[in-house]
Amino acid sequence: MMNSNLRNRVTAALEVLVEHKQLTCEAADLAKQEYLDLVDKQSMQEQLKNFNRKNDQLDHFMYQLLSKENISKALLSFVRKILVLFHANAAVKCSFSINKQCLVENLLEDSLVAQHSIYDVFISAGSVKYVTITKQMMHAFRNASGKRSAALKKMKTQEDD
């Protein structure tokens, strides 16, 4: 049977998200009921017991579990928002170490932002092999050299002025 402490925590989290207009009331009600039903299942409890704090990343672990279930967008949105809250400090610390790896003398801010964007795509996909290459990405790749040349010309013009 469901732990009342868990029910209270989920309710409180959803109330905060609704209060800050991150979820609608309807989506919060649906997410709450679906989440509580899901974690009440014996099979889900067994899978949750397999989580290892030292070896597993919580977001990957949860997404693997939830991908096996037929969940609503409301519940997926709720889980994502909660995971972002818990991982906020870790993400900030991680970005500092990534900055160190990316920094090169005179590296432009746009380049650093682009590298972070690419890194975030790989992280959210789980691995490079899971990133789907779209037509938009191919066009951006093909046009990158032209954009770089145009940016360099613009910078040179600004320096001359």
Image (cartoon, rainbow, N blue to C red):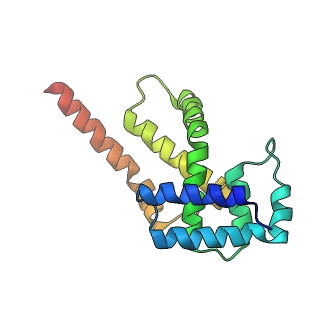
User: In this rendering, is residue 11 above or below 153?
Assistant: below
Q: Is residue 89 above or below residue 50?
A: above
Q: 124 or 74, which lies in front?
A: 74
Position of 152 relative to 36 (above/below): above
Residue 9 location, quadrant: bottom right
Q: Nearer the viewer, residue 27 or 108?
A: 27
Let me know if residue 18 appears in the view.
yes
Q: Nearer the viewer, residue 107 or 49?
A: 49
The residue sitting at the bottom extreme is 70
On-image quarter of the N terminus: bottom right
Q: How many marks?
A: 0
Residue in view at x 25 percent, y 37 percent: 153
The quarter of the image holding the C terminus is top left
Examine the rendered structure and indicate whether residue 139 appears above or below residue 105: below
Whether residue 144 sits left or right of residue 16 in the image: it is left
Furthest-top residue in this view: 105
Q: Quadrant of residue 148?
A: top left
User: Which residue is drawn at the image coordinates 55% and 27% (left, top)?
Assistant: 100
Displayed quadrant of residue 93? top right
Q: Residue furthest left?
A: 161
Q: Position of residue 48 (x, y in %)?
A: 80, 59
User: In percent of the image, x 25 and y 33: which residue is there?
Assistant: 155
Q: Is residue 73 visible?
A: no
- Residue toward you, 110 or 87: 87
Q: Position of residue 111 (x, y in %)?
A: 42, 38
Residue ID at (40%, 24%):
106
Q: Position of residue 156 (x, y in %)?
A: 23, 31
